[in-house]
Amino acid sequence: MKKIFLIMAMILLSQTVLFASSETAINAYAIDNMFLFLAAVLVLFMQSGFAMLEAGLNRSKNVVNILFKNFMDMSLGVILYYAIGYSLMYGNSYLGGWFGFAGFGISSVPPTPAAGALNPQVDWLFQVAFAATAATIVSGSVAGRMQFKSYLIYSIIITGLVYPISGFWKWGGGWLDALGFYDFAGSIVVHSVGGFAGLAGALVLGPRIGRFSRNGQVNAIPGHNLALAALGVFILWIGWYGFNPGSQLAITGADNTNAVMLIATNTTLAAAAGAVFSMLLAWSLYKKPDLTMALNGALAGLVGITANCDSVTNNEAIIIGLVAGILVVLGIKLLDNLKIDDPVGAWPVHGLCGIWGGIATGIFGPYSLTSQIIGSVVIPIWAFGTMYALFTFLKSLGILRVSEEDELRGLDISEHGEEAYSGFQIFTAE
C-alpha cells in the first residue's frame, strides 16, 4: 500500500511540476508579446512626432500637405508591407542572400508558448512601424514643392520594395548579415534609407523658390510654428523607447531585462548629448543658441545610437551622441553650401548620422569595422540610387514638382483645396 501511495505522490508531483513549467512558459510568452505590442504602439506614435516636426518647420500654407503625406505613409505602408514587404524582408533566401520571399501576407498560426516566442501578428505590427518610419523621413526633405500623387507613388515603392529588400540583407539573414554587419535597431537599415531617399528627392526636385539667391546667398525660410516642431521632437524621443528597447524583442529573463534597461539608458544619454553639443556648436558658429539645431541634435543622437545601443557602454553612448550632434550641424551647413534644399534637415539627421551610427558600431562595439563600413555604404547607395531613378522618372513625366504658381500659393490650397489655419485671410472690400 505504501508503494502505491508513493507512486501516486510521484505522479502528482510530476504533474504539478509540468503544470508549473507550462504556466511559466505561457506567462513569459504573454509578457514578451505584450512588450513587443507596446513597443510597436510607441513606434507607430512616432508618426505623429514626424508630422508635428515637419509641419512646424515648414510654412503654414503647406501644413495640410505635410500632415496628409505622413498619414498616407502610415496607411499605404500598412497595406503594402502586409501584402508583400514583410515577406520580402523576412522570407526564404534566394540569389545568394540578395533577395528573400515567403509568399503574400503574414501567418496567423501562433507559436508554441515559450519565452521569446513571438506571435507573427505582433511581429509584423512591430516591423511595419519601422517601415513607415523609413518612408516618412522623406516627407520633410521634399516639403513645399512635390505633387501629392507623385509622393504616393514614392511611398508605395519604398515601403513595398526598396526598404524590405535592403532590410532583408541584414535583418532577414541576407548577405550583409552573413558578412557580419550589425545594426541592432536601424541606424542604417531604417534611418539611412529614409535619409538618402530624401536626399535624392531634394536633388531631383531642386530648392524651394527663394531658398537660394542667384548670387549664392542662402535665404532662411523659417518654420511657422516652433512649438509644434519641439512637440514633435519630444514625441519622437519618447517613441524611440519603443524603437530601440523594443528591438530586443523580449523582456523576460535576466539577460533580456538587463539588455532593455541598458538600451533605454544609452538611448537617453545619446539624445541628450546630441542636443547639447549641437546647441554649443551652432551657438559658436552663429552667435545665438538655435532651437532648431538643438532639436535636430537630439534626433541625431537618437539615430546614431540606434545601431549599437545594446552593445556600448553609457560613456560610449554619450560620445556617439556628441559626435552625432556635431555632424548634424556640419551636415546642414554642407547642404547650404551645395545649394541643396532640405527643409527639415532630414539627410543630416537620418542619412549622415545613420552612417555614423553604423560605423560607430564597429568602433565601439565588438564588430568588424570593415563589415560595418561596407553595410553603412551599400545600403545608403541602394536607397539613394533607386529613389533618384524613381524621382527622375516622375520628373520626366512632368508630375514631380508643382507649378511655380501653386508653390507660391501653397500646397494646401493648390493640391488639397483646404487649409490648416482657415479664417485668417484678409479680404479687401471692393
Image (cartoon, rainbow, N blue to C red):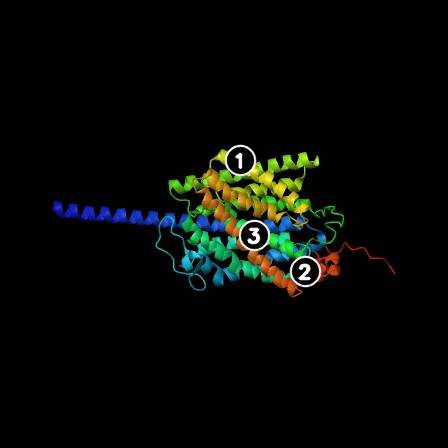
Q: Secondary structure at mark 3?
A: helix
Residue 251 at x, y = what percent? 42, 44
In the rendered structure, are the residues bearing label 3 and label 1 in contact, judged by CB atoms less than 8 Å apart? no
N-terminal label among 1 and 2:
1
User: Residue furthest toward the bottom?
Assistant: 397
Q: Amino acid at mark 1?
A: Ile
In the rendered structure, are the residues bearing label 1 and label 2 in contact, judged by CB atoms less than 8 Å apart? no
Q: Nearer the viewer, residue 284 or 313?
A: 284
Residue 79 at x, y = what percent? 52, 62
Q: Secondary structure at mark 1?
A: helix
User: Residue furthest toward the right?
Assistant: 430
Quarter that holds the C terminus: bottom right
Label 1 sits on residue: 319
Say left or right for 292 vs 313.
right
Q: Residue at x 57, y 54 (%)?
A: 384
From the viewer's perspective, is residue 311 above or below residue 41?
above
Residue 346 at x, y = what percent? 61, 48
Label 2 sits on residue: 401
Q: Nearer the viewer, residue 117 or 384?
A: 384
Say left or right for 369 vs 393.
left
Marking on residue 194: 3
Q: Amino acid at mark 2?
A: Arg
N-terminal label among 3 and 1:
3
Residue 225 at x, y = what percent? 69, 47
